Amino acid sequence: MELTIETIRLSEKQKQQLTTLKRKTGIENWNVLCRWALCMSLAEETSPAYEDIPSNSNVEMSWKVFSGEYSEVYLAILRETYQKQKAHLIGVPFSDFFKLHLNRGISFYLQHN
């Protein structure tokens, strides 16, 4: 099983939520907002609930753009968390695990701003 991510494509719902966050925070870059959202979710002890998250918006970024200069750090944290939480998300591939955490993090971020 390959534990890498090449491309991140957001759902239309995530795009709308991030647009709201951009307006509230003044932060213009999707990748910065997404990084913070991911970290908020990964800080939780629990696994995110499984849901089918479509990639149906026009917001897309490479892993390198998403993660920036700390690409290896984000990937290492994701891999470690995946190893800890995969028993709760049986059959969920690594890329979907990432999407679940990103999705939950965006919702958390929106609630706290």
Image (spheres, grey):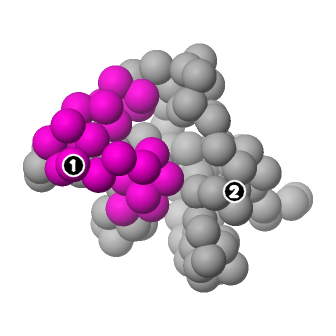
Q: Is residue 51 left or right of residue 61?
A: left
Residue 46 appears in the picture as rendered: no
Q: Do the residues labelled 2 and 1 touch (CB within 8 Å)?
A: no
What x and y, as percent, mark residue 47?
Answer: 43, 56
Number of marks in the rendered image? 2
Tag 2: amino acid: Trp
Quarter containing the N terminus: bottom right
The quadrant where residue 69 appears: bottom right
Residue 59 in the image: above or below residue 68: above
What secondary structure is found at the residue carrying circle 2?
A: helix
| Labels 2, 1: front one | 1
Name which residue lies at 56% across and 44% down.
Answer: 99
**Mark 2 or mark 1: which comes first in sequence?**
1
What x and y, as percent, mark residue 15?
Answer: 42, 28
* Residue of label 2: 63
What secondary structure is found at the residue carrying circle 1?
A: loop
Tag 1: amino acid: Gly
Q: Is residue 40 left or right of residue 89?
A: left
The image's mark for residue 26 is 1
Residue 75 appears in the picture as rendered: yes
Q: Is residue 111 left or right of residue 60?
A: left
The residue segment tinted magenta is 14-36
- Answer few, some or many: residues within 10 Å of disc 1's Cα (few below 14, many 20 plus, some between 14 and 19): few
* In front of the other: 75 or 60: 60
Please tell me whether residue 43 belongs to the stretch shown in magenta.
Answer: no
Look at the magenta stretch and give its main secondary structure.
Answer: helix
Name which residue lies at 36% across and 62% down.
Answer: 36
Name which residue lies at 20% across and 37% down.
Answer: 23
Please tell me whether residue 32 belongs to the stretch shown in magenta.
Answer: yes
- Answer few, some or many: residues within 10 Å of disc 2's Cα (few below 14, many 20 plus, some between 14 and 19): some
Residue 5 in the image: above or below residue 49: below
